[in-house]
Image (tube, rainbow, N blue to C red):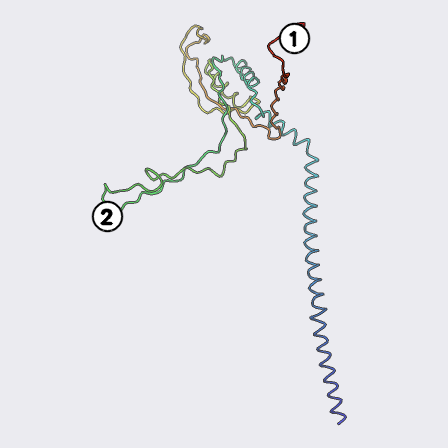
Amino acid sequence: MAGSKRSTWIGGTALAGVALGAGAWFLAISPAFDAAAEVREQTSQTVQRNDLLEMQVTKLAADYAKLDQYKAELAALQVQIPTTARLADLTRQIAQIAESRGVTITALAPAPPQLVVPPVAAAPAAPATTDAGAGTDGTEPAAGGAGGEAAPVASPDVVVPAGLVAVPLSLTVVGTYDATVAFVGDLQGALPRLVLVTDLTGTSQEETEAGGGKPATARGDQEIVLSAFAYVLPDPAAGATAPEQPAAVPASVPGKNPLVPAAGE
């Protein structure tokens, strides 16, 4: 009898212990573990953010240390592609290389600037389709236009800075063959400004006297007519100057005729 009661108490005690352990796990221990895991995750994310910020700060510090170098590089680039047209300077530079090569400029005319846009690449033409029941005369053009050509699309490989403009130049020079060829080379390679020759026509000259704005020429001399572009990239940081406001007109005096001179005048 006593053994039976003792077994019952032991069994009840063990069951109560299991129940208490389960209750403690679900009510206290498991939530604490979850909270600890969440804190560890937040800590890991914070450490990662701090590491990223530290890398960014280090890079900014390195860039700041090279600020003078970047300014010098920018200034050098702005000599080649200035922020304004500066046509007077460009004309003087072209005249200097013409003088150094011994050629005569007979015409130099800039045109209004034009915005530079990325070149477009035409998509390959779609193959023409023929109706199975149609003969040779029943062939219909493919969709997309006559002859099946698709609309041109912008080339993704060309990046054009926003606001870049090109100033067209038309230039005519006369001189010996070697001198004119050297002048064209200097125009693209020796000028401080970036100049791109896009079209060129050379004409052989006969022996003639000076006249009509052209120098005297010998047989075998050459006249070159070329088209070129000089480039300008306006500075986006330079804000537009606000227009000056006109002065206010003085208000009229009631009862006074403005056309009648004042006393003493």
Q: What kind of residue is marked 1?
A: Ala
The Cα–Cα distance between marks 1 and 2, rounded to whole angstroms, is 100 Å
Q: Residues within 10 Å of mark 2 (few under 14, many from 20)?
A: few
From the viewer's perspective, tell me whether residue 180 is left or right of residue 249: left
Q: Position of residue 124 (x, y in %)?
A: 38, 40
**Residue bearing mark 1:** 262
**Residue bearing mark 2:** 133
Q: Position of residue 115 (x, y in %)?
A: 50, 28
Q: Position of residue 117 (x, y in %)?
A: 49, 32
From the viewer's perspective, tell me whether residue 261 is left or right of residue 120: right
Between 251 and 214, the residue placed more toward the observer is: 251
Q: What kind of residue is marked 2?
A: Gly
* Image quadrant in which you'd find residue 202: top left
Between 53 and 203, the residue placed more toward the observer is: 53
Residue placed furthest toward the bottom:
1
- Position above or below: 30 against 235: below
If you read the primary sequence from the N terminus, does the residue marked by circle 1 or circle 2 appear first? 2
Q: Position of residue 91 (x, y in %)?
A: 54, 17
Label 2: element kind: loop
